[in-house]
Image (cartoon, grey):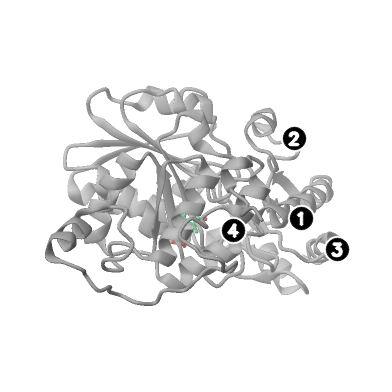
Amino acid sequence: MMVPNSGDFSHPDTLAVLAGRGLAGAELAPTLYPTTTFRIPSLALGRQMALDPTESHYYTRNGNPTAAAFENAMAEMEGAEAARAFASGMGAVSCVVLGLCSTGDHIVAQRQLYSGTLFLLQAVCPRFGIEVSFVDCAESGAFQAAVRPGKTMLVFAETPANPGLELVDLAELGAISGPFKVVDSTFAPPPITRPLDYGVDLSLHSATKGIGGHNDATLGVVSGTAELIASLWAFATLQGANAAPFDAMNGLRGLRTLGVRLERQSASAQDLAAVLVDHPKVVSVSYPGLSSHPQHDLAARQMRMFGGLLSFDLVGGCETAERFVQHLRLAQVATSLGGPETLVAHPASTTHAGLLPEELKGAGIGPGTIRVSVGLEHGDDVVGDILQAVEQA
Ligand SMILES: *Cc1c(COP(=O)(O)O)cnc(C)c1O
């Protein structure tokens, strides 16, 4: 009997099932290697192992077989040569930023960013003499225009952006020459978008979200060329934000069902967006699948599905938002996204609470902005619950 080989298939849903099995034997489920260390056969080999970015049987901070299975699976999904897993999405983000940039370097980033990334770029980078220019990601040519030849080391993008769902034109981003281009693609995992196909250098995810998909893994991952991942590895082993084997195992388990979960979440989110967009208590809805999204054509070009995330603005602001969440019966208020449960977040009072009013505005967040991560419940129940809470808000 043939063992199915991921190299024979290209559909992302099939790849997700087959990917990352290179290290495995006949077992079908991911294998957990909690060991922190491994017997070294000889000192000469030990020296090799200590210096090899792909070595998974030396010391777990450098690499681990469970993490490697997840990394290899993600690399296959992304169409990349290599990947590195991290203890969280922020572990991945901080490794890319601080591993690639030095004092005197310049970064171009978008204003609409996950709050942790925004704080790292705004508050930590200047402490190390790394200057950051922020641009509007939806404005054509904005990233390119902010690049300073010879000085810009990194262009950092996120698409769709958290929480406002603005998009970055990946073909335009990939065409920038000089700096490394990195895309945080957490809102559009590989069955939706593969940034590397557009000439981007690194694709990054908080696998804590949709990839892990069950709210039981805190995990990050970065994919790219073997050379670039190896140079990140050198910093990553010192940074120490390596993926825990247990979380990498859950990440790989989650990846197997990613395609079907995204289909359900995308279908329900589309229905929810369509209902909210006409509602008198809703000022605006941002969902890439709506024809009213200012970048809907771009979304249709670079997203295979539109995803389970949407945001909307309630008429009224903070007090209305408070009444809205008090009336929810199915959706729950919690940070994070991409899991089985429909989750609602109010960025102004949680993830982005540290921002000044003008920064909130720049990030596209108002006092009445609600972000919904549509879960795996039946779409009718999700739409019904959000709608009744909006009506009573
Ligand atoms: C959650 C998130 C992160 C950070 O990931 P953690 O796993 O929480 O560290 C980064 N980027 C985006 C877009 C996110 O949603």
Going from N to C along the chain, the mark reached first, 4 or 2, is 4
Mark 2 is surrounded, within 10 Å at the Cα level, by few (under 14), some (14 to 19) or many (20 or more) other residues, namely: few
Q: Is residue 355 above or below residue 134?
A: below
Label 3 to label 4, Cα distance in Å?
Answer: 29 Å
Labels 4 & 2 near each other (Cβ < 8 A)? no
- x 37%, y 39%: residue: 225
Q: Amino acid at mark 4?
A: Leu
Badge 2 element: loop
- x 49%, y 63%: residue: 24
Q: Which residue is mark 1?
A: 264
Residue 136 left/right relative to 260: left
Q: Which residue is mark 4?
A: 255
- Give the label, 1 or 2, closer to the camera: 1
Badge 3 element: helix
Going from N to C along the chain, the mark reached first, 1 or 3, is 1
Residue 279 left/right relative to 292: right
Q: Which residue is mark 2?
A: 292
Label 4 to label 1, Cα distance in Å?
Answer: 15 Å
**x then y, percent, for residue 127:** 20, 51
Label 4 to label 2, Cα distance in Å?
Answer: 31 Å
Label 2 to label 3, Cα distance in Å?
Answer: 22 Å
The answer to which of 214 and 35 lies nearer the viewer is: 35
Q: Quadrant of the N terminus?
A: bottom right
Q: Which residue is mark 3?
A: 384
Badge 4 element: helix
**x then y, percent, for residue 183:** 46, 41
| Total marks placed | 4
